Amino acid sequence: MRFELGRLLATPACIRFCEQHGVDLIDLVRRHHSGDWGDLEAEDKRANEDALQSGARVFSSYRVGDDRVWIITNAADDAGNRDATTAMIPSDY
């Protein structure tokens, strides 16, 4: 995999959304972890690639019908460790 995920978290609304829409949330996390950033513009995908080097946060967005699931990995701390990855829906943000 391409970067550290830290703790895996998901908002209750995201869990319900995925259950209601038959979405495998772990599969989305795997895609995020492997560098498949989902439905992002090219500029945002480049920003994620840069973030892997700089330690900035990493963001993925996956379309589910008319909605989306977002997965965000926190920026790295001074030691280069990322402490958490959170799955959410846009209304959670």
Image (cartoon, rainbow, N blue to C red):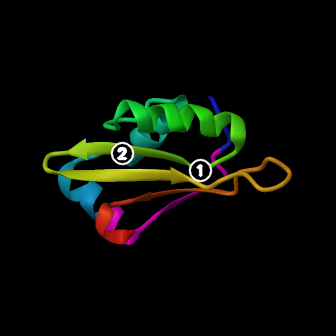
Q: Amino acid at mark 2?
A: Ser
Q: Give the label on residue 57, or none.
A: 1
- Indicate whether residue 24 is drawn in magenta: no
Residue at the extreme left: 66
Q: Is residue 77 above or below residue 50?
A: below
- Indicate whether residue 6 is drawn in magenta: yes
Pointer 2 local density, CA inside 10 Å: few below 14, some 14–19, many at least 20 = many
Residue 78 image offset from top left, x and y in percent: 83, 55
Q: Quadrant of the C terminus?
A: bottom left
Q: How many marks?
A: 2
Q: Name the residue beneath numbered marker 2.
A: 61
- Name the residue rendered at 38%, 52% in the picture: 70
Residue 35 image offset from top left, x and y in percent: 51, 30
- Name the residue rendered at 26%, 51% in the picture: 68
SS at badge 1: loop
Residue 53 image offset from top left, x and y in percent: 70, 34
Would residue 2 be found to the left or right of residue 13 on screen? right
Would residue 74 be found to the left or right of residue 72 on screen? right
The segment highlighted magenta reads: 5-14
